[in-house]
Amino acid sequence: MTDRPEFEQRDADWLGVHEALERILGRHAPLPAVAVPLGEALGRTLAEAAIARARLPPWDNSAMDGYAVRSADLAGASETAPVELEVIGVARAGASELPEVGPGQACRIMTGAPLPPGADGVTRVEYTDGESGREGWVRIHSEGDAGRNVRPGGQDMERGDAVAPAGVRIDSGWTALLAAAGVDPVPVHRAPEVLIVTGGDELRSLDAFHDVVEGRAIPDTNAPMLAAAVRAAGGRPRVTGPARDDAADLRRHLAQARDADLVVTVGGASMGEADLLKRTFEEDGLEVDFWRVRMRPGSPMAFGHLPRPGGGPPLPLLSLPGNPASAFVTFQLFGHPLVRHLSGDPRPHRPVIAARAGERLGSTPRLCHFHRVVIDPAAPHDPLPTVRLAGHAGSGLVHSLGPAAGLAVVPEGIAAIEQGERVEVVLLRDTPGAHAPAFADAR
């Protein structure tokens, strides 16, 4: 019989990246729905289909400035034989009272204005004399617009239409559509509350950076980095501040997880004597789902569940390695999709593109290697962009994290991807274009 915690007795699972991700996402359903004002819905995920509350456009309306007419009156109109119609009024956007257009009549109309009764088309101004001849009359010298230039009522949406499906992540375009449909407030999945616990006597937050300047400590890079990553994924981070290498202090930090949806810990995932995070958590009932993944950087990561302070469903715990680059990569690959999944996104993973290796990307064949890379535009003769290392590959260094736009993947079983070979890249951000698109130069 041993009193060593389960985690220290457990053999490493050494899961593949895909299996680890499946286990993480498979244990949890999206969070419940809440209603938020449309102005606060950006980046959130629709929890149910959005239904239009009105018909849009509410009426048949003009697609351009011109004259509302009866198509029958335009028969045979030409430059040499124009048709002359009596102008009986004007229709403007938002007009509530409109004249009825009868045979031999026309109504001046503005773009977006309701089509007057009796009219079935709009003749553009360019096909007329603009009433420059006889006062109160317009000459039309083309029949080309007969029955045209009318946008039918309900063309955009009818009342009761589902205008956006559940699972849509709301951006500016969806915001416009929801506003047009009158969807306010908006039913979205609740944003996950994520508690971030970093640990180590050597760490200092920014308010104690003087200790770093004086050489007595190192900065807690992981806390602000992961808080930003949680926000980018649509979650709400809560940083406890660095916990000391002391079980009581760790438990004090963890007590703040009472209403959290996810706990992310950093460091303490190895077997060292001072690696107290896992040891303390297992003493408090941590159920370890897996420990170690066949990847680099970041293999000593773990996922499990803790009893929730105050009771309730178990609290998911994602434990990341302490080195900044390892914590960065593992969160992007596992934490980001988990937060997106909890937020209701049915496609929570980051996009993957094909690229060309601009230099040799080495690996250890038994591991899947994720290189931090910058992405250069494709050459004129090659449809694929080129990737190159963003900086030194050391997992304890942060310099490469800033410029990294993607993670170039060297799969298990491959010693290297050589310069010029095709490589898959997990995108971490939108990459800037090298030049304006071709249409911008059109004249």
Image: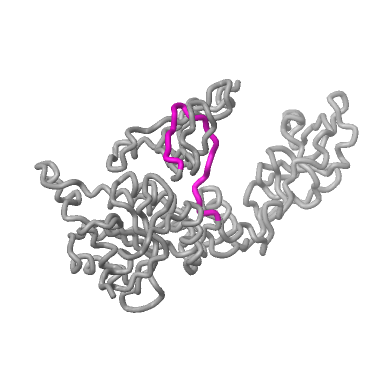
The residues colored magenta run: 347-365
Quarter occupied by the C terminus: top right
Specify the quadrant of the image occupied by residue 165. Answer: bottom right
442 in magenta: no
Query: Which residue: 54% across, 32% down?
Result: 422
Q: Which colouring convention does the figure follow?
A: one colour
Residue 42 seen in this snapshot: no
Residue 97 rendering spot, x and y as whole percentages: 68, 55
Q: Looking at this rendering, what residue extends furthest in the bottom direction?
A: 311
355 in magenta: yes
* Residue nearest the viewer, comparing 45 with 316: 316
Query: Which residue: 43% across, 58% down?
Result: 339
Specify the quadrant of the image occupied by residue 88. Answer: top right
* Residue nearest the viewer, comparing 423 with 40: 423
Query: Which residue: 40% across, 58% down?
Result: 235
Residue 328 rendering spot, x and y as whole percentages: 35, 47
- On screen, 258 above or below 80? below
